[in-house]
Image (cartoon, grey):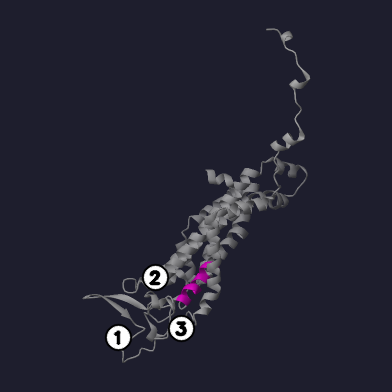
Protein backbone atom coordinates (compact mmCIF):
# COMPACT_ATOMS: atom_id res chain seq x y z
CA UNK A 1 0.00 0.00 0.00
CA UNK A 2 1.43 3.34 -1.05
CA UNK A 3 1.18 6.62 0.81
CA UNK A 4 -0.46 8.03 -2.29
CA UNK A 5 -3.60 6.04 -1.46
CA UNK A 6 -4.18 8.28 1.63
CA UNK A 7 -5.71 11.66 1.39
CA UNK A 8 -5.92 13.96 4.42
CA UNK A 9 -9.03 16.08 4.64
CA UNK A 10 -9.36 19.35 6.65
CA UNK A 11 -11.66 17.76 9.23
CA UNK A 12 -9.31 14.85 9.98
CA UNK A 13 -7.59 16.89 12.65
CA UNK A 14 -9.09 18.82 15.56
CA UNK A 15 -7.41 21.52 17.60
CA UNK A 16 -7.40 20.95 21.34
CA UNK A 17 -9.47 23.62 23.01
CA UNK A 18 -8.48 25.59 26.05
CA UNK A 19 -11.07 23.82 28.15
CA UNK A 20 -9.47 20.41 27.49
CA UNK A 21 -6.02 21.65 28.39
CA UNK A 22 -7.29 22.87 31.75
CA UNK A 23 -8.66 19.43 32.53
CA UNK A 24 -5.13 17.96 32.57
CA UNK A 25 -3.59 20.80 34.59
CA UNK A 26 -3.58 20.67 38.38
CA UNK A 27 -2.55 23.50 40.62
CA UNK A 28 -0.78 22.81 43.93
CA UNK A 29 -0.54 25.48 46.57
CA UNK A 30 2.95 26.45 47.68
CA UNK A 31 3.87 25.32 51.19
CA UNK A 32 6.83 26.30 53.34
CA UNK A 33 9.20 23.76 54.89
CA UNK A 34 8.00 24.35 58.45
CA UNK A 35 4.33 24.15 57.42
CA UNK A 36 5.02 20.89 55.64
CA UNK A 37 6.87 19.61 58.73
CA UNK A 38 3.96 20.57 60.97
CA UNK A 39 1.54 18.83 58.63
CA UNK A 40 3.52 15.58 58.76
CA UNK A 41 3.86 15.82 62.54
CA UNK A 42 0.13 16.33 63.13
CA UNK A 43 -0.64 13.27 61.01
CA UNK A 44 1.25 11.11 63.51
CA UNK A 45 -1.35 10.22 66.15
CA UNK A 46 1.24 8.69 68.48
CA UNK A 47 3.32 11.88 68.51
CA UNK A 48 0.26 14.03 69.18
CA UNK A 49 -0.76 11.74 72.04
CA UNK A 50 2.75 11.93 73.48
CA UNK A 51 2.74 15.73 73.26
CA UNK A 52 -0.66 15.94 74.98
CA UNK A 53 0.47 13.69 77.84
CA UNK A 54 3.68 15.71 78.26
CA UNK A 55 1.65 18.92 78.53
CA UNK A 56 -0.71 17.30 81.06
CA UNK A 57 2.23 16.02 83.13
CA UNK A 58 3.83 19.48 83.11
CA UNK A 59 0.55 21.07 84.24
CA UNK A 60 0.16 18.54 87.06
CA UNK A 61 3.80 19.00 88.10
CA UNK A 62 3.18 22.74 88.41
CA UNK A 63 -0.21 22.72 90.13
CA UNK A 64 -0.49 19.16 91.52
CA UNK A 65 1.41 19.71 94.80
CA UNK A 66 -0.81 22.72 95.57
CA UNK A 67 -4.29 21.26 95.02
CA UNK A 68 -4.29 18.44 97.56
CA UNK A 69 -3.89 20.65 100.64
CA UNK A 70 -0.85 18.69 101.85
CA UNK A 71 2.89 19.31 101.56
CA UNK A 72 5.43 16.77 100.35
CA UNK A 73 7.30 16.66 103.68
CA UNK A 74 4.39 16.82 106.18
CA UNK A 75 4.34 13.71 108.40
CA UNK A 76 1.18 12.70 110.24
CA UNK A 77 1.80 9.43 112.06
CA UNK A 78 -1.90 8.81 112.64
CA UNK A 79 -2.44 8.95 108.85
CA UNK A 80 0.18 6.39 107.91
CA UNK A 81 -0.53 3.58 105.39
CA UNK A 82 -3.89 4.95 104.25
CA UNK A 83 -5.19 3.57 100.96
CA UNK A 84 -6.34 5.90 98.13
CA UNK A 85 -9.66 7.65 98.76
CA UNK A 86 -11.33 10.10 96.33
CA UNK A 87 -14.45 12.19 96.91
CA UNK A 88 -17.48 11.08 94.90
CA UNK A 89 -15.79 8.04 93.40
CA UNK A 90 -15.78 6.30 96.77
CA UNK A 91 -19.55 5.82 96.44
CA UNK A 92 -18.91 3.54 93.45
CA UNK A 93 -16.94 1.12 95.62
CA UNK A 94 -13.54 2.08 94.22
CA UNK A 95 -10.92 4.38 95.77
CA UNK A 96 -12.94 4.33 98.97
CA UNK A 97 -9.96 3.81 101.27
CA UNK A 98 -10.31 0.08 101.64
CA UNK A 99 -7.54 -2.41 100.93
CA UNK A 100 -6.96 -6.13 101.32
CA UNK A 101 -4.52 -7.07 104.05
CA UNK A 102 -2.75 -10.43 104.02
CA UNK A 103 -2.91 -12.14 107.40
CA UNK A 104 -1.99 -15.56 108.72
CA UNK A 105 -5.62 -16.63 108.35
CA UNK A 106 -6.08 -15.21 104.83
CA UNK A 107 -6.98 -11.85 103.35
CA UNK A 108 -8.96 -9.22 105.20
CA UNK A 109 -10.66 -6.13 103.80
CA UNK A 110 -9.71 -3.12 105.89
CA UNK A 111 -10.59 0.58 105.77
CA UNK A 112 -8.56 2.71 108.17
CA UNK A 113 -10.64 5.81 107.40
CA UNK A 114 -13.67 4.26 109.12
CA UNK A 115 -13.58 2.33 112.38
CA UNK A 116 -15.20 -1.11 112.49
CA UNK A 117 -16.74 -0.10 115.80
CA UNK A 118 -19.56 2.33 115.01
CA UNK A 119 -19.30 3.83 118.49
CA UNK A 120 -15.69 4.90 117.89
CA UNK A 121 -14.58 7.57 115.41
CA UNK A 122 -11.14 7.61 113.81
CA UNK A 123 -11.16 11.30 112.93
CA UNK A 124 -10.50 10.37 109.29
CA UNK A 125 -14.08 10.23 108.05
CA UNK A 126 -13.68 13.53 106.15
CA UNK A 127 -10.03 13.06 105.16
CA UNK A 128 -9.13 12.19 101.57
CA UNK A 129 -5.79 11.07 100.13
CA UNK A 130 -6.13 10.56 96.37
CA UNK A 131 -3.01 8.36 96.07
CA UNK A 132 -2.94 7.26 99.72
CA UNK A 133 -0.15 7.83 102.26
CA UNK A 134 3.19 6.19 102.95
CA UNK A 135 4.61 4.60 106.10
CA UNK A 136 5.29 8.05 107.60
CA UNK A 137 1.84 9.46 106.87
CA UNK A 138 2.97 11.64 103.94
CA UNK A 139 0.65 12.34 101.01
CA UNK A 140 1.76 10.24 98.01
CA UNK A 141 -0.17 12.45 95.57
CA UNK A 142 1.81 15.55 96.51
CA UNK A 143 5.10 13.66 96.66
CA UNK A 144 4.49 12.06 93.24
CA UNK A 145 4.00 15.37 91.46
CA UNK A 146 6.89 16.91 93.40
CA UNK A 147 9.03 14.05 92.15
CA UNK A 148 7.74 14.69 88.63
CA UNK A 149 9.21 18.18 88.83
CA UNK A 150 12.63 16.62 89.39
CA UNK A 151 12.16 14.30 86.41
CA UNK A 152 11.20 17.25 84.19
CA UNK A 153 14.19 19.18 85.51
CA UNK A 154 16.43 16.27 84.53
CA UNK A 155 14.80 16.29 81.07
CA UNK A 156 15.59 20.01 80.72
CA UNK A 157 19.18 19.46 81.84
CA UNK A 158 19.60 16.65 79.30
CA UNK A 159 18.40 18.87 76.44
CA UNK A 160 20.58 21.81 77.48
CA UNK A 161 23.67 19.64 77.85
CA UNK A 162 23.06 18.03 74.45
CA UNK A 163 22.33 21.25 72.57
CA UNK A 164 24.83 23.56 74.27
CA UNK A 165 27.81 21.25 74.60
CA UNK A 166 27.37 17.97 72.74
CA UNK A 167 26.19 19.66 69.54
CA UNK A 168 29.06 22.19 69.47
CA UNK A 169 31.61 19.51 70.37
CA UNK A 170 30.46 17.30 67.48
CA UNK A 171 30.29 20.18 64.99
CA UNK A 172 33.85 21.31 65.73
CA UNK A 173 35.23 17.76 65.76
CA UNK A 174 33.62 16.79 62.46
CA UNK A 175 34.31 20.02 60.59
CA UNK A 176 38.00 20.50 61.35
CA UNK A 177 38.89 16.80 61.27
CA UNK A 178 42.51 15.67 61.37
CA UNK A 179 44.36 16.00 64.67
CA UNK A 180 41.56 18.08 66.21
CA UNK A 181 39.04 15.31 65.52
CA UNK A 182 41.41 12.62 66.79
CA UNK A 183 42.09 14.40 70.11
CA UNK A 184 38.43 15.27 70.73
CA UNK A 185 37.20 11.77 69.92
CA UNK A 186 39.79 10.05 72.10
CA UNK A 187 38.78 12.33 75.00
CA UNK A 188 35.10 11.46 74.45
CA UNK A 189 35.90 7.74 74.34
CA UNK A 190 37.76 7.95 77.67
CA UNK A 191 34.79 9.66 79.33
CA UNK A 192 32.34 7.22 77.76
CA UNK A 193 34.36 4.31 79.10
CA UNK A 194 33.73 5.39 82.71
CA UNK A 195 30.33 4.11 83.97
CA UNK A 196 27.93 6.82 85.12
CA UNK A 197 27.43 5.03 88.44
CA UNK A 198 31.16 5.28 89.17
CA UNK A 199 31.16 9.00 88.34
CA UNK A 200 28.19 9.67 90.62
CA UNK A 201 29.73 7.64 93.44
CA UNK A 202 32.97 9.63 93.20
CA UNK A 203 31.05 12.90 93.12
CA UNK A 204 29.19 11.94 96.29
CA UNK A 205 32.53 11.70 98.07
CA UNK A 206 33.10 15.37 97.24
CA UNK A 207 29.57 16.79 97.00
CA UNK A 208 26.51 15.88 99.03
CA UNK A 209 23.88 13.74 97.27
CA UNK A 210 21.28 15.83 95.51
CA UNK A 211 20.26 17.46 92.28
CA UNK A 212 23.63 19.17 91.88
CA UNK A 213 25.43 15.82 91.94
CA UNK A 214 23.07 14.30 89.37
CA UNK A 215 23.27 17.40 87.17
CA UNK A 216 27.09 17.30 87.16
CA UNK A 217 27.04 13.55 86.39
CA UNK A 218 24.76 14.13 83.39
CA UNK A 219 26.88 17.07 82.25
CA UNK A 220 30.03 14.93 82.31
CA UNK A 221 28.84 12.05 80.11
CA UNK A 222 25.34 12.91 78.85
CA UNK A 223 26.55 14.81 75.78
CA UNK A 224 28.65 12.09 74.14
CA UNK A 225 25.82 10.54 72.13
CA UNK A 226 24.77 13.92 70.74
CA UNK A 227 28.37 14.80 69.80
CA UNK A 228 28.71 11.61 67.77
CA UNK A 229 25.49 12.25 65.87
CA UNK A 230 26.50 15.86 65.14
CA UNK A 231 29.97 14.74 64.00
CA UNK A 232 28.55 12.10 61.65
CA UNK A 233 26.17 14.61 60.08
CA UNK A 234 28.96 17.15 59.58
CA UNK A 235 31.16 14.55 57.88
CA UNK A 236 28.33 13.93 55.39
CA UNK A 237 27.84 17.60 54.56
CA UNK A 238 31.21 19.33 54.74
CA UNK A 239 32.28 18.15 51.26
CA UNK A 240 29.01 19.19 49.59
CA UNK A 241 29.04 21.78 46.80
CA UNK A 242 27.38 24.55 48.80
CA UNK A 243 30.03 24.24 51.53
CA UNK A 244 32.82 24.40 48.95
CA UNK A 245 31.14 27.44 47.39
CA UNK A 246 31.07 29.20 50.78
CA UNK A 247 34.77 28.48 51.29
CA UNK A 248 35.55 29.78 47.81
CA UNK A 249 33.72 33.01 48.56
CA UNK A 250 35.88 33.47 51.67
CA UNK A 251 33.39 32.51 54.40
CA UNK A 252 34.85 32.00 57.88
CA UNK A 253 34.83 28.59 59.55
CA UNK A 254 32.38 29.64 62.27
CA UNK A 255 30.03 31.08 59.64
CA UNK A 256 30.08 27.82 57.68
CA UNK A 257 29.52 25.71 60.81
CA UNK A 258 26.62 27.67 62.28
CA UNK A 259 25.05 29.23 59.17
CA UNK A 260 25.53 26.56 56.50
CA UNK A 261 25.88 23.18 58.22
CA UNK A 262 23.85 23.57 61.44
CA UNK A 263 20.51 24.54 59.79
CA UNK A 264 20.73 21.43 57.59
CA UNK A 265 21.21 19.01 60.52
CA UNK A 266 19.23 20.82 63.22
CA UNK A 267 16.22 18.54 62.77
CA UNK A 268 18.25 15.38 63.42
CA UNK A 269 19.84 16.98 66.48
CA UNK A 270 16.45 17.90 67.96
CA UNK A 271 15.25 14.32 67.47
CA UNK A 272 18.40 12.99 69.13
CA UNK A 273 17.94 15.30 72.11
CA UNK A 274 14.32 14.10 72.50
CA UNK A 275 15.49 10.48 72.57
CA UNK A 276 18.09 11.33 75.23
CA UNK A 277 15.43 12.62 77.65
CA UNK A 278 13.94 9.21 78.64
CA UNK A 279 17.46 7.85 79.16
CA UNK A 280 18.35 10.77 81.46
CA UNK A 281 15.10 10.39 83.44
CA UNK A 282 15.70 6.66 83.83
CA UNK A 283 19.27 7.33 85.00
CA UNK A 284 18.02 9.68 87.72
CA UNK A 285 15.32 7.19 88.77
CA UNK A 286 17.88 4.38 88.94
CA UNK A 287 20.29 6.45 91.02
CA UNK A 288 17.46 7.40 93.38
CA UNK A 289 16.38 3.76 93.61
CA UNK A 290 19.82 2.67 94.82
CA UNK A 291 20.03 5.58 97.27
CA UNK A 292 22.21 8.02 95.30
CA UNK A 293 19.44 10.45 94.40
CA UNK A 294 17.95 13.48 96.11
CA UNK A 295 18.04 13.35 99.93
CA UNK A 296 14.98 13.04 102.13
CA UNK A 297 12.47 14.52 102.64
CA UNK A 298 12.63 15.74 99.03
CA UNK A 299 11.15 13.12 96.73
CA UNK A 300 11.81 12.01 93.18
CA UNK A 301 9.96 9.31 91.27
CA UNK A 302 12.91 6.98 91.72
CA UNK A 303 13.11 7.49 95.48
CA UNK A 304 9.33 7.05 95.78
CA UNK A 305 9.54 3.74 93.94
CA UNK A 306 12.49 2.69 96.12
CA UNK A 307 10.64 3.49 99.36
CA UNK A 308 7.38 1.92 98.18
CA UNK A 309 9.16 -1.23 97.04
CA UNK A 310 9.81 -2.10 100.68
CA UNK A 311 6.05 -2.15 101.37
CA UNK A 312 5.01 -3.66 98.04
CA UNK A 313 3.68 -6.91 99.50
CA UNK A 314 1.54 -5.18 102.14
CA UNK A 315 0.60 -1.86 100.50
CA UNK A 316 1.03 -2.18 96.71
CA UNK A 317 -0.79 1.10 96.01
CA UNK A 318 2.28 3.03 97.23
CA UNK A 319 4.34 1.97 94.20
CA UNK A 320 1.62 1.93 91.53
CA UNK A 321 1.14 5.67 91.00
CA UNK A 322 4.84 6.72 90.83
CA UNK A 323 5.50 3.86 88.40
CA UNK A 324 2.57 4.90 86.18
CA UNK A 325 3.68 8.55 86.09
CA UNK A 326 7.29 7.58 85.33
CA UNK A 327 6.16 5.20 82.56
CA UNK A 328 3.87 7.85 81.02
CA UNK A 329 6.69 10.43 80.99
CA UNK A 330 9.21 8.11 79.33
CA UNK A 331 6.69 6.71 76.82
CA UNK A 332 5.42 10.20 75.91
CA UNK A 333 8.91 11.53 75.18
CA UNK A 334 9.67 8.45 73.08
CA UNK A 335 6.47 8.92 71.05
CA UNK A 336 7.23 12.62 70.60
CA UNK A 337 10.78 11.90 69.46
CA UNK A 338 9.55 9.25 67.03
CA UNK A 339 7.04 11.70 65.55
CA UNK A 340 9.67 14.42 65.19
CA UNK A 341 12.01 12.00 63.45
CA UNK A 342 9.34 11.07 60.89
CA UNK A 343 8.40 14.74 60.40
CA UNK A 344 11.97 15.94 59.82
CA UNK A 345 12.95 12.96 57.65
CA UNK A 346 9.93 11.17 56.07
CA UNK A 347 12.28 8.65 54.39
CA UNK A 348 13.16 7.18 57.81
CA UNK A 349 9.60 5.86 58.14
CA UNK A 350 10.06 3.72 55.02
CA UNK A 351 13.30 2.13 56.21
**Disc 1 versus disc 2: distance between alpha carbons?**
27 Å
> Looking at the image, which residue is at 48% across and 60% down?
331
**Disc 2 versus disc 3: distance between alpha carbons?**
19 Å
Say left or right for 313 vs 27: left
Q: Quick one: 157 or 68, which is closer to the camera?
A: 68
Magenta stretch: includes residue 142: yes
Q: Which residue is mark 3?
A: 74
Magenta-colored span: 141-153
Mark 3 crowdedness (10 Å alpha carbons): few <14, some 14-19, many ≥20: few
Residue 314 in the image: state x and y as whole percent: 31, 74
Q: Is residue 179 visible?
A: no
Residue 93 in the image: state x and y as whole percent: 36, 75
Residue 253 in the image: state x and y as whole percent: 71, 49
- Residue 319's tag is 2
Q: Is residue 175 visible?
A: yes
Could you tell me if the residues under marks 2 and 3 are in contact, i.e. CB atoms within 8 Å? no
**Element type at mark 2:** helix
Amino acid sequence: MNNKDFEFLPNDFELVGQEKILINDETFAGQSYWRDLLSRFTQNKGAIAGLIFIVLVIIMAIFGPKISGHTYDAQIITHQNLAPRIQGIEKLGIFDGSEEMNTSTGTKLQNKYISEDTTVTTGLEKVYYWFGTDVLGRDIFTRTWTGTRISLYIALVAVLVDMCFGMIYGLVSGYFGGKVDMVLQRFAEILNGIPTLVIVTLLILVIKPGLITITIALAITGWIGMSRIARAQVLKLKEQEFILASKTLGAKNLFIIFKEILPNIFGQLIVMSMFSIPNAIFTEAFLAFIGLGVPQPLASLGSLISDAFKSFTTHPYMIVFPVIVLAVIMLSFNLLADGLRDAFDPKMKEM
